[in-house]
Image (cartoon, coloured by chain):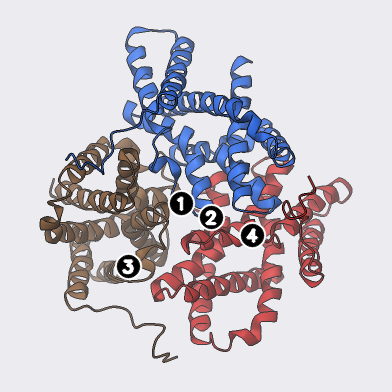
Chain colours: A red, B brown, C blue
């Protein structure tokens, strides 16, 4: 129940981020809905297709469909006002990333994959909806340039497998690893921490 | 037999639309053939991969391969003359969209999916070949901006499930729903009907 | 053992080509690693997903992961010096294409697909990592414009099935078809051979 609320909040935040990019590109209503969908379920779809889960998860869970359609509708309707919600949306988005990361990792574990692959799947679940959104909008994916998404997911993923060495309770691991993703991202954004640049001072 | 002719006409129209976009981007012969393929079978491939049909349909039906290669060859050869065929091509394309929509819907029904997911699969089958074509050509997908493809598919899809409430004969439903897609699209293009804009007068 | 060395050299070359494109687009460390991965394993992933091999191959073989991460790390570190290696990299890349083509063909044969589909799968395995790389970097895929990749793969693929008519030893066929891809590509680049243009003199 608690997880479902978290999941829905994350899905809403992802869908709205899609709507905002699509409106920015002056897409029509159909394009806006598709981009909202793709942003919200694209990462999980890619994960399911590569791991071999068929039909992909969102196709068998109508909750996502209704939540995304609803979020897209209200985001279009209230887009003038959405700026006031920017802080809540950022929080929902971050919560969504934390949750999606851990869900992706557990999909990999169930499929019997290596921890590094599981962490890659978690990161993919959390980040690749945004990648597909940016490709459909003809942009270089933002997370390949300004890295505020992926590193928290990867750190959270390593924590997950570290915790598994010491803790038996999988629910506890799930929550803690998700919280680590969320906290690292909040701190990184708050203190403007990013990966060391590969360019500029040319330290290599 | 009748369906096969319709299917081949649709495939030809889709492949030729791919060739025209690829020539416009000054691609070489290999690029032109790939874009022709992707436009014709991309939507169905995406559907099959997401639903879990392996290998994807066109890989086990050589008719598509030969038809697409032939259509690409003649489209390149006769591209100066193709303008005279624009009206026929538009008709074939519309027929193809009608057929692909219903085929996609029935794939979803066979997989036991919810009607809304089935309609999404039908629309995907009909429209996403063009989306992948546009992405490979580095354009924002045209159907996300000028909506002349998707709405007829969605309306046809709803008709399909409405008809199922009252009619038992699935062939009849297949034909009528396909015709609704075709007629709605012809009318929309003829009378320049499109979705209400989200921009401009800013009515929201 | 010999094949594994070839495979690793090819993977290194593909990963490095990804790193160079990503650095050119001024991506951050995360983007660089993702593009290296996608270039190296993207073609095989697409093939596996379309044929129905789950989880996709690289997820169950950690060698690829370590090789790609290592190659990406050294390519970033030594990118100033990488120009001196351009000739070796081109050779590794060509060897990789030869190997990937034959591996892709054999995946299709195992799945019981038609020879033309198998050749398409081989070409896809060898070339589509680069296609996905270019799309993620917001470029029209280079192989759709300057065709130096695909034709050798297609010729090698036809040789494969021609040889199967006369030779029983599949290892021998594997090596010869791979060598044909490699030699055709080396000759094409050496003598600047390309497909006849569809444009310019407008010979059609």
Q: CA distance from mark 3 to mark 1?
A: 19 Å
Q: Which residue is mark 1?
A: B50
Say if A72 sits above or below B67 in the image. Answer: below
Determine whether label 1 and label 4 are within 8 Å by CB: no
Q: Residue A110 placed where, x, y %?
A: 66, 46
- Disc number placed over residue A45 in the picture, else none: 2
Q: Helix, strand or loop at disc 1?
A: helix
Q: Residue furthest left?
A: B84
User: Residue B203 versus residue C187: which sits nearer the camera?
Assistant: C187
Assess disc 4: are there few (<14), some (14-19) or many (≥20) residues with their C-alpha within 10 Å of its C-alpha. some
Residue C105, image quadrant: top left
Question: Which is more N-terminal, label 1 or label 3?
Answer: 1
**Chain letter, disc 4 residue:** A
Q: Are marks 3 and 2 in contact (CB under 8 Å)?
A: no
The location of residue C181, given as percent across then percent down, is 43, 22
How far is the residue under mark 1 from the one under mark 4?
25 Å
């Amino acid at each position: 129940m608690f997880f479902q609320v978290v999941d829905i909040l994350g899905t809403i935040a992802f869908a709205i981020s899609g709507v905002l990019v699509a409106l920015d590109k002056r897409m029509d209503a159909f394009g806006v809905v598709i981009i909202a969908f793709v942003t919200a379920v694209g990462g999980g779809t890619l994960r399911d297709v590569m791991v071999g889960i068929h039909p992909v998860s969102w196709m068998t869970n109508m909750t996502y469909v209704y939540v995304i359609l609803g979020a897209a509708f209200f985001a279009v309707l209230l887009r003038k006002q959405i700026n006031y919600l920017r802080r809540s949306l950022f929080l929902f988005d971050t919560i969504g990333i934390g949750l999606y990361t851990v869900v992706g990792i557990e999909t990999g574990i169930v499929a019997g994959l290596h921890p590094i692959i599981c962490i890659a799947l978690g990161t993919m679940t959390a980040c690749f909806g945004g990648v597909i959104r940016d490709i459909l909008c003809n942009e270089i994916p933002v997370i390949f340039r300004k890295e505020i998404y992926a590193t928290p997911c990867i750190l959270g993923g390593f924590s997950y497998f570290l915790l598994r060495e010491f803790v038996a309770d999988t629910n506890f691991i799930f929550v803690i690893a998700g919280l680590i993703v969320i906290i690292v991202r909040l701190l990184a954004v708050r203190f403007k921490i990013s990966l060391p640049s590969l360019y500029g001072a040319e330290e290599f």
